[in-house]
Amino acid sequence: MKMEKIMRSKVKDLLNAAPGRDVLAKGWVRTKRGNKQIKFIALNDGSTIHNIQVVADMEKFDEDLIRRITTGASLCVKGKLVESVGSGQAVEISAEEIEVYGDCDPVRFPLQKKDTSLEYLRTVAHMRPRTNTFGAILRIRHAMAFAIHKFFNDKGFVYLNTPIITQSDAEGAGDMFLVTTLDLAEVPFKENGKVDFSRDFFGKKTCLTVSGQLEGELGATGVGEIYTFGPTFRAENSNTPRHLAEFWMIEPEMAFYDIDDNMDLAEEFVKYLVQYALDHCMDDLRFLNDKYDEGLVDRLHSVLGISFQRLTYTEGIEILEKAIAEGHQFEFPVHWGTDLQSEHERYLVERHFGKPVILTDFPKEIKAFYMKQNEDGKTVRGMDVLFPKIGEIIGGSEREASLEKLEQRIEELKMDRKNLEWYIDTRRYGTVPHSGFGLGFERLLLFVTGMANIRDVIPFPRTPKNAEF
Ligand code: 4AD
Ligand code: MG
């Protein structure tokens, strides 16, 4: 059957359109119900969480064609947009012509009502985006990515693309994935028994980046304010609902910002993103709120009208030690000098302050080499933004701007300087006070969508022992 040429409309636009005109819609069947005289087909094209109802009068259609319209099948429908008589929608399509693009075997269809658990959906990559849940998440993920670019563009920041293949272990944690073309069956060794990376593709040892920050600092100390937004990779063996081996990070870096300016920007940034989600993604948020997390929309509102609680790490430890003295039990020990676990972070945020917290001034031993050293000789000017249900969502700092102090820290940590000279040069030629931070994109999405597992806010999650699709 040939369709007369009408412009195709997205379901989202049709649902908001005035009835009366001829329309063309394309999408996948969610459900079909009805009787011998009339069929009601719920059609979705991914443009919105809502379906458009297609009404097919059986007098106009061939039985065989209607039989092929099963859940999951893809259709092209021409008809008139009319006021809906049924409840639940303002308009519907009174079908005149229907073409089935692709049949979908109802017996073998992998999205049966009986198993649509989030765990199961992770195993059917082609079906995941067809579900209401993942459709909502993908649309919100897109809206947040767009809002991130808009936020920084409106402030005059330059989007800087930093390398994915790198030799620098910015965070010094050593949990990097090796990038090599060496034949693993015939690895060349040097006399000292170490791998001879001079024979490798790049002539040196290279890895996937854990952060674009160091390169970002080079950009910021030239064009002033930059941000990166790209994939980062960490080979840490953390099988938690908050860790991915491949995740996306947004890293702004600003010349002439001190730690307070940095905190102000971070707070403004996340509030902007939450507000953007509330303004632009309400249909999807409501769906997620009703299906998974009753407190979601309220929690999003709750971070907007208030100031985040700012306190030092030392003050945070005092609060946690007091909680323990009063009988609160944590799984992990906590005392001055330990890195906080997410249970400690969440205690501060959810139990003690009841709002997001920005912790600053950490013991230098638990933070990276580039953080500005405080006068006390013990702490560095780092900042972590902690959020309800998530814990750390942002990590950042004012950077050590003094060449001497930076070199001394690199030495103390016995880092390999030879791969860092290009970075150290920024402190040699016109160094400036500067700051920056990294927002974990999927951690942000955990907060905005209310999902409990980080694997469910990224299209193709990579975690230990899992790199499907
Ligand atoms: O705190 P991190 O390690 O900081 C940095 O990488 C700095 N270079 C950022 C900067 O100052 N430019 O990581 C930043 C954020 C964390 O707060 C967290 O939200 C996220 O990245 N993150 C992860 N997200 C998912 N899976 C993981 N394995 C993550 N590791 C960090
Ligand atoms: Mg961190």
Image (cartoon, rainbow, N blue to C red):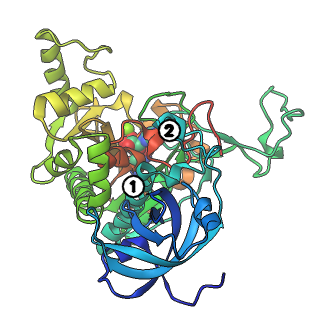
Q: What is the quadrant of residue 108 in the picture? A: top right
Q: Position of residue 18 (x, y in %)?
A: 29, 83
Q: Which residue is mark 1?
A: 136
The amino acid type, in three-letter code, at marker 1 is Ala
Residue 230 coordinates in the image, percent (x, y): 50, 56
Of residues 276 and 270, the one drawn nearer to the viewer in this rendering: 276
Q: Residue at x 33, y 25 (%)?
A: 341
Q: Residue at coordinates 51% horizontally, 53% vertically from top-left?
A: 129
Q: Is residue 58 above or below residue 170?
A: below
Q: Earlier in the sequence, mark 2 or mark 1?
A: 1
Q: Is residue 1 above or below residue 389?
A: below
Whether residue 380 sits left or right of residue 115 in the image: it is left
Ligand 2: quadrant of the figure: top left
- Residue labelled with disc 2: 244
Asked if disc 2 is less than 8 Å from ligand 1, the answer is: yes
The crowd level at tag 1 (other Cα within 10 Å; few <14, some 14-19, many 20+) is: many
Residue 11: % across, % down: 41, 71
